[in-house]
Amino acid sequence: MIAVFGARRAPHALVLAALIVAQCSSLSWRALPSERCMRSARLGARQPARAPPAPPPVAPARAPMAPARDRPAARALAAVLFSLALAGGSPIDGAPVAPVHAASGPAVKSSDSGIGLYVNKDGNSILRLTLPRITELPGLYSAQELAETIKLRFDQVGYKRDPVWTAAAGDAGMLERALQELEPELLAKAPQSLQARALAPFREAQANVRPLLAALREQDISATLRLQGSIARGLAAVQAELFPAQTLPYELPLEYAGLPQLRGRAEVEMKLVKGKGNAKRFCAATSSMYTGRFGLSYSEVKESQEDMKGGECAVENTASEATIRLTLDGYHAPITAGNFAALVQGGFYDSMPVQQITDLSIQTGNAKKAGKPPPARTVPLEIFYKRDAKPTYSFTSDEDRRGAETMALPFQSYGALGMARQSADLGGEIDNDSATSEFFFVKYDQALIPPGRNTLDGAYSCFGYTSEGAAFLRNVEVGDVIASAKIVSGLENLKMPDK
C-alpha cells in the first residue's frame, strides 16, 4: 500500500491501512462479506486524498445496525499503525479513531446529495425539494432550487465574506426572473379550481423577492434567511396545492394493500419529558437545528451565543419538557410512514421511554421493553432511489447492487427518522421485512456520516425528518419519555386497510 501512495504519502497509507484493519475487524462476516473490506482498500489506493468513510452507530441486536465481533489482535494492529502514522506527521484533524464501515461504491457527487456543489443537510429543504413535481410547470421546481440554494450557500460557506453575498444576490436575481416567467404559465396551465389556492402563496413568495434582494445588498443575514425561508415555503405550498390530494404518483404493489398507507404527508407533534433522575435538561436556546456540524442556522448563532454560557445552556433557558415536530413523507415511504402514523394515531407511542442511545442514533418503540403488546403487523424494507419513480421493497441497495446510488430521503439531516428491524435469529441475521414499531432518530454529524457515504442509506427505511425542535434531541437521555404523540396535520392522508 505504501508503494501505491509513494514515500511522501507513507503516513497516509498507514492511516488507510489502520482504518481497513479496524473496519474488517469490526464487521460481522455473516452480515457483510470480506470482499467489501478489500473493495475499500482498492478504492482507497486509487483515491488517496479522499477522507475515510464514516463509522455506523454501534448497537446490539434489534438495533438499526448489525452487531460486530471483536477481534483484539486486529484492533491492536490498527492501533500500532495509527501510532506510526501520527509519528510520521499524518493529519488526523482531531477526529476520533474508530472502526470504519466501507461504503459499497464510489463517492457520491455533491449534486446527488444536494444542489450543485452544496450538500443539503436541512430536512425541511429536502422535503420541499422532493415534493412530487408538476410536470406541466417545470419552472416551478427550478425556482424552488434557486430559493433553496441561497440558504445552502450561507450554511456551508458562512456569511462574512463578500463573494457569498454576491453569489446569493445572483441567485435571487435569477429567482425574480424565473417567477416573472412562471406566473403566466401558472395562470394558463393550472386547473381553474386550484388556481386561487396556488396563486396566493405564489404571489406572497413573489412579493418577498425584492425585499430579499435589498437584504442581500445590506448583508443582513437575519432578514435574508427569514425572507428566503418564506419564499421557499411559499413555492413548496404552490406545488402541494397543485398536486392531487391523497394521491401517490405511482401504484403500490397489491401485496401491501393490507397495510396502512400514508398518501401524502403528515405532521406529528411529540412531547418529550425528562426521565426521573436524568440530569440533562432540554436547552431552549438552541431549539432549531438544521445544518452544520452543530446544527445552528446562521440567523440563530448570535442569539445562541448570548444564551449559552461556557458552552452550556444557561439555566433560565432550560426546561424539563420539550416539543418536537416530525414530518412523515408518504410520497417516498408510504408503507413505513403509514405504519408509523397508524401507531401514533392509536396511542402506541404515548408514555414510551427512550430505550437506547449511541453516538449517532436515539432509538425507541420496542414494545417488549416498554411492557406493551407488540403490534400485529410487520412492514417491509422500503427505500426510494433518487432517480426512480417509485419505492423499492425488501432488498437493500447492496443486495440490489445499487450501493453507489443516493436516496430521495437521505439520512443526512439531524433528526432524520429511520425504521429499525428485528433480528431473525440468535446469530444476528437481519430480516429486511421485519419492522414493526421500533424507530430511531439520526444524530447527523457530517464528520461521522459523510453525505452519500453512510451505511444507513439504502439499508434502512427513512420515512421523514424532525422538522421543528431537532436540537432538543441533543439533550435526550435513556429513560426520557415520549409523553404523547399526535398527528396534528395530514390525518386525512392516512389510509387504513379495509377490515
Image (cartoon, rainbow, N blue to C red):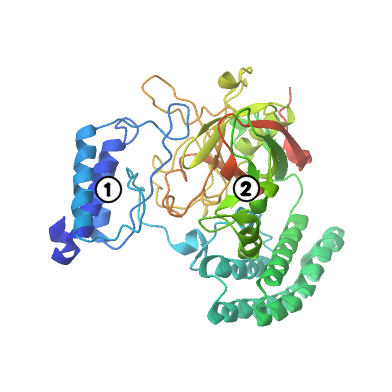
Q: Which secondary structure, mark 1?
A: helix
Q: Which secondary structure, mark 2?
A: helix
274 in relation to 121, above or below: above
247 in relation to 177, above or below: above
Viewer-closest of 209 and 174 = 209
Q: Amino acid at mark 1?
A: Leu
| Quarter where residue 206 is shown | bottom right
Report how many numbered discs are placed on residues in the image.
Answer: 2
Q: Residues within 10 Å of mark 2 (few under 14, many from 20)?
A: many
Q: Position of residue 423 (x, y in %)?
A: 45, 24
Q: Position of residue 293 (x, y in %)?
A: 50, 56
User: Is 189 on the left or on the right of 10, as rendered?
Assistant: right
Viewer-closest of 337 and 71 = 71
Task: Tell me, for residue 19, which label it has, or none.
Answer: 1
Task: Tell me, for residue 470, which label it has, or none.
Answer: 2
Task: Tell me, for residue 159, which label it has, or none.
Answer: none
User: Is 186 on the left or on the right of 354, as rendered?
Assistant: right
Q: Is residue 389 visible?
A: yes
Viewer-closest of 273 and 494 = 273
Q: Is residue 249 visible?
A: no
The residue depicted at 12 percent of the width and 59 percent of the height is 3
Q: Quadrant of the C terminus?
A: top right
| Quarter where residue 370 is shown | top right
Tell me the CA gap for discs 2 and 1: 32 Å
Q: Amino acid at mark 2?
A: Ala
User: Is 350 on the left or on the right of 295, as rendered?
Assistant: right
Q: Position of residue 170 (x, y in %)?
A: 61, 80
Q: Residues within 10 Å of mark 1 (few under 14, many from 20)?
A: many
